[in-house]
Every structure is written in structure tokens, then in C-alpha cells.
Image: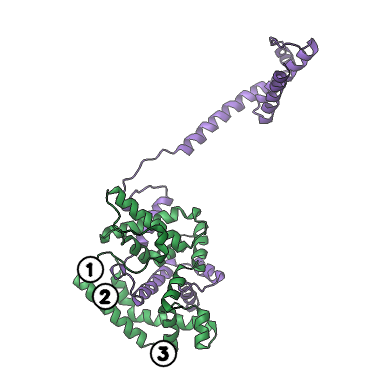
Amino acid sequence: MTADSDKQRDENSDSQTDLQLVRKVRHGDRSAFDLLVVKYQSRVASIIGRYVYDHQEVMDLTQETFVKAFRAMERFRGDSAFYTWLYRIAVNTAKNFLESRSRRPQSGADAADAENFEDGFRLRDNASPDRLLHRDQLQRELEAAISALPEELRSAFLLREYDGLSYDDIAGILECPIGTVRSRIFRARESVDRHLGPLLNDTRT
Amino acid sequence: MDDRLKETLSAMMDDEADELSVRRLLSREGQDEVCAQFQRWHQVRDLIQRRNPAVDSIDVSEGVRDILEGHDQGLDRGDVAGQPARKRWHWPAVAMVALALAVGFGAGTGWESGSLSSDQLAAAGDVPELPIKGMDEQQREQLSRYLLQHAQHNSFGSSHASMGYARAVSASGAEY
């Protein structure tokens, strides 16, 4: 199995964390829903961007998708992954929006394909030259931050973020306990975050 | 947020956190800090995977939170994707008031008939007889008394008494 397919499998798996968060939301914990929003907002925006090209409309529909998801949370039965369920809401929200504007969907994508969406994002990138410059700077800083990591942290971090391997698999590859993998990945994230933190704060819209 | 909790949050990023740790993390004060940290790590992940460059900085979490807080307070802000606010009648409240009035009226009527003396009840027994065919005098008298008792029980709002009344009528109809 390739690294890409591993990553795809990981993203589409019935996330244990998602189910934990959904349970908390159902018990009235709003902060758990905040985490789900943060986790999925860029992916939801991505799927909506297949139908709607305007950046502000994408923002509005992404927001609407999460509000709908929250209100429908009691009806989420867990038959599919939360990720898939959310994507279906996003697709329907985008299609309804286009129908309300008497426009045909600009993509042949269907809700059933939601699990396979990730690449081929079509939203027009209307970023200003300043933003493009900033993005390039972020990429360079990211590479520098990763290069500066101690070898054992970098290996664990990259196996996780680039290859999407589980902690168990990484522990097998690096021949160390799972707890060590968990700790190394955390420390790597902390280090990268310290490096990029101020730049990341500038990018939020 | 201490390092132990941050490590739990990091494990949550990778779907490797156990439920107890997640519960501990979510029950602590200062969820804004948790959310902000989670968001930064996700931004880094998006950057690493070069996912969606056009939306790499999108953040709707605050807007969603505002709308849902308005929803909780019973406010239909109607500001989701520019939809106009709709006025809604509060039918449940109207129904509850109507039900309370009906119950109050019924209870008042019931208390009044409950205070009837035995003489009044006996007098009430002199109701016009229904022309029921095929019954002898004793059966008619028995049925009248039975219906009168049920009518009295009904005035107290007893639902099972209504059922008994229905059975009596049904029985008489079936036989004749």
C-alpha cells in the first residue's frame, strides 16, 4: 500500500477522536464542537470550493455547513464516519445555494464521492501578491523549522504528517515504545509551532 | 495548558488519544487556548500537506460559535449565508396555556359534581329512560345506574372511566 493510499485511509477512517467529540457535543459540550470546526473547516471549504468560486461565498457556506451539522448532530447515527457525514452536508449546502441562485452546480461531484475529495480543489485563488508572498514565506519557514528538528523528532513527525502512519506503525519503524512516539511528535509540533506561531497568527481571516 | 494536556491534544490530532484523556482535556478551563492551539497545528498540517492553498487561512470557528450562541438564546439571527430572519410563533407555549385552561375548567367542574349529596345523586337517578329494546325493568335500571356512575366518574376526568362507559354502550349495542 502506498503512502498516499495510507493517508487517504487514515482521513476516511471512522475517527475515534471524532466520535469522542460528537458524544461530548451531544452532551452539551460546545467546546468539543469548536474542535470539530477547527479540524474540518479547511476541508469543508475545499469541497464547497468545487461548486462555488467566490471566496466570500465559500466562507459563508462553510459556516452554514457547520451550523447545520450542529443542529443535526442528534441525527448523526454513526453509520458513516463523521467526516463523510459532514461532507454530505457541505455538498448539499453548496448545491442548495446554487439552486437558490438558479445556477447549475459547476462540478459533477456528488455526495457519494465526498470521501474521495481532497485534490483538484477548484476555488479560484484570488490571493493578493502580499498574501502569496506571505504563503511562500510560511512554506520556507516550515521547511526551516522541520530541518532544525533533532533527528528522532523529525523522523516521527514526518512519518506521521507526510505518510499518515499510526503511532503503532511508527513505533515499529523507529523501534521505540508508542509513548515515546507520542511524546516525540508532540515535541516536534511544539518546536514547529514556536517557529511559525507569529506567522500563522497573521494568516487567519 | 500544561505539557501533559498539550500532548493529549497532539494525540487527538492523530486520532490516538484515549477517551479519559480527551474528557480531562475538554473539561478544563480555558477552552479558547485549547482551540487556538488545535487550530495552529492543523494549519501546520495543511501547510505540510499543501492542502487547499486558497483556503489555508480560513477560519469560521468564531462565526459559527456566534450563530450557535444566538441559537441557544432563542434568537433566530437568520444570518446564515444571508438568509432573512423568519418570525416564528411559539406554538408549544400557546398549546401549554390552552391545555392548562382546559384542565382548570375540567377540574372545577369535577369538584362541583364531587360535592353532590347522596340525595342529589338519588334525584339525579330520575333521568329519562332510553328506549332500549329487549331489556326487562331490572336490566334497564341496572344499566341506568351504571351509566350514571360513569358519568359521575367522568366529571373527575378519569380516563379509565370513559373506557368503561364506552364498553357499556358497546355491549348494549352489540346485543341489540
Residue at x 30% of width, y 82% of height: A141
Residue with the mark numbered 1 = A127
Instruction: Give me the disc on residue A135.
Output: 2
Image quarter where the C terminus of chain B lies is: top right
Residue at x 34% of width, y 77% of height: A197
- Chain A drawn in what color? green
Circles 2 and 1, Cβ within 8 Å, touching? The answer is yes
Residue with the mark numbered 3 = A150
Which residue is at the front of the view, B96 or B168?
B168
Do the residues at discs 3 and 1 belong to one chain? yes
Residue A181 visible in the picture: yes
Q: In the rendered structure, the residue with mark 1 lies on which chain? A: A
**Image height of A135 relative to A30, above or below:** below
Estimate the x, y position of residue A138 in percent, counting from the top left.
Answer: 29, 78
Estimate the x, y position of residue B5 in percent, counting from the top left.
Answer: 49, 74
Give the CA separation, mark 2 to mark 1: 10 Å
Question: Which of the marked residues, 3 or 1, is nearer the chain's N terminus?
Answer: 1
- Chain B drawn in what color? purple
Question: Which of the marked residues, 3 or 2, is nearer the chain's N terminus?
Answer: 2
Q: Is residue A58 left or right of residue B42?
A: left
Q: Is residue B58 left or right of residue B125?
A: left
Amino acid carrying label 1: it is Ala
Q: In the image as oriented, which residue stretches furthest toward the left?
A: A129
